[in-house]
Amino acid sequence: MPTNTGAMLDPRFMGMPTFIRAPYTTDLKGLDIAMVGVPYDGGVTNRPGARHGPREIRNASSMMRTLNPATRNSPYDDLNVADVGDVPLTEMYDPAKTVDEIAAFYEGIVAAGVRPLTAGGDHSISYPILKAVAAKSPVALIHFDAHCDTWDQFQGSRFMHGAPFRRAHEDGLIVGEKTLQIGIRGSQIIPDGWDYSEGAGMKVVFMHQVEEIGINGIIDLCRQTVGDMPGYLTFDIDGLDPVFAPGTGTPEVGGFTTREALAFLRGLRGLDIVGGDVVEVAPSYDSSGVTSLAGATMMYEILCLMADAPSLPKNG
Ligand code: MN
Ligand code: MN
């Protein structure tokens, strides 16, 4: 299925919106990378609305083209990339069943030999995705976020959006010493999540440390930590400053600019990124659409990284 044709050449305002203008299909056969929406926000602890993220990110994706201005990546050239639609959720008022349902959908993708790139949804969806992606062997994790998301539970739920990487670590899906959490900030009631991350050997880069380390320092730290291990990249839009991404449920001031985030992602080129997600875009607080555009753009940059992954066979 050629992907660098058709809709990609159309004017930006024309046609049906799909993720990064890829063709829509539900047939996984022959695909290299599947882009998926998970319209679920049953795990939020503050403002809801990320269930509307996939639809608005698809719309904002109309601004994406093939050729990366910085790296000259063109992820559609040698690969078959498609939008395979949304996970068809049927149990969304039951978080534990939703975890199983999302995991089952991604198990189908992985079984077909396809790598997933996801738009959420709240951050709880990364746990069931990792259950599928890391089912056979654990992965390194590059986690961009204002929050560690390694808390144990909230209001009795172990599947809320502040817990996915604690669950993933407990299940042996991610390697603590091969995990970086970047951009952490905001006050807390107790240090449970911070402590769990550091106790698990994760490298936690607090936002106040970024001033000293700089973006290049963070890139170096990522490259050293992940090495040549298969890695999963999870991008919580609230890692960006709310000035750049107001449309999210748990905003924290003092975050990254979009320009810093682009430099960071482009600096990871060559790492073996086998899957990724962009989560927590909540369009109802995004009056200008800038958060959805940031989400779509970061998704494109992660697609470029996945297309360059050393372990991904290229057609060309
Ligand atoms: Mn998060
Ligand atoms: Mn967050």
Image (cartoon, helix red, strand yellow):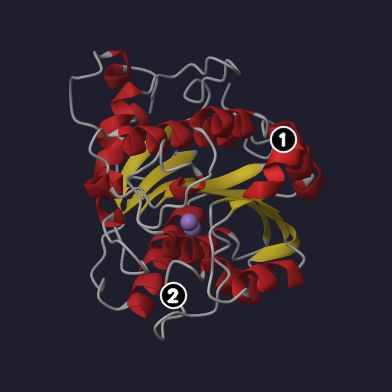
Residue located at (59% from left, 66% from top): 135
Q: Is residue 141 above or below residue 62?
A: below
Left or right relative to 77: residue 198: right
Q: Position of residue 185 (x, y in %)?
A: 57, 55
**Rendered image quadrant of residue 290:** top left
Q: Position of residue 90 (x, y in %)?
A: 23, 69
Q: Which mark is residue 159?
A: 2
User: How far is the residue under mark 1 from the one under mark 2?
Assistant: 33 Å
Q: Nearer the viewer, residue 215 or 234?
A: 215
Q: Which mark is residue 41?
A: none
Q: Is mark 1 within 8 Å of ligand 2?
A: no
Amino acid type, residue under disc 2 in the picture: Phe
Question: Can residue 92 be seen at all in this image of the molecule?
Answer: yes
Q: Report the quarter where the C terminus lies.
A: top right
Q: Position of residue 180 (x, y in %)?
A: 69, 53
Residue linked to disc 1: 214
Q: Is mark 2 within 8 Å of ligand 1?
A: no
Q: What SS does tag 1 mark?
A: helix
Q: What SS does tag 2 mark?
A: loop
Question: Can residue 200 be seen at all in this image of the molecule?
Answer: no
Dot 2 surroundings within 10 Å: few (below 14), some, or many (20 or more)?
Answer: many
Amino acid type, residue under disc 1 in the picture: Gly
Q: Report the quarter where the N terminus lies.
A: top left
Dot 1 surroundings within 10 Å: few (below 14), some, or many (20 or more)?
Answer: few
Left or right relative to 297: residue 187: right
Residue located at (51% from left, 71% from top): 163
Marks 1,2: beta carbons within 8 A = no
Q: Is residue 56 above or below residue 99?
A: above
Q: Position of residue 109 (x, y in %)?
A: 45, 53
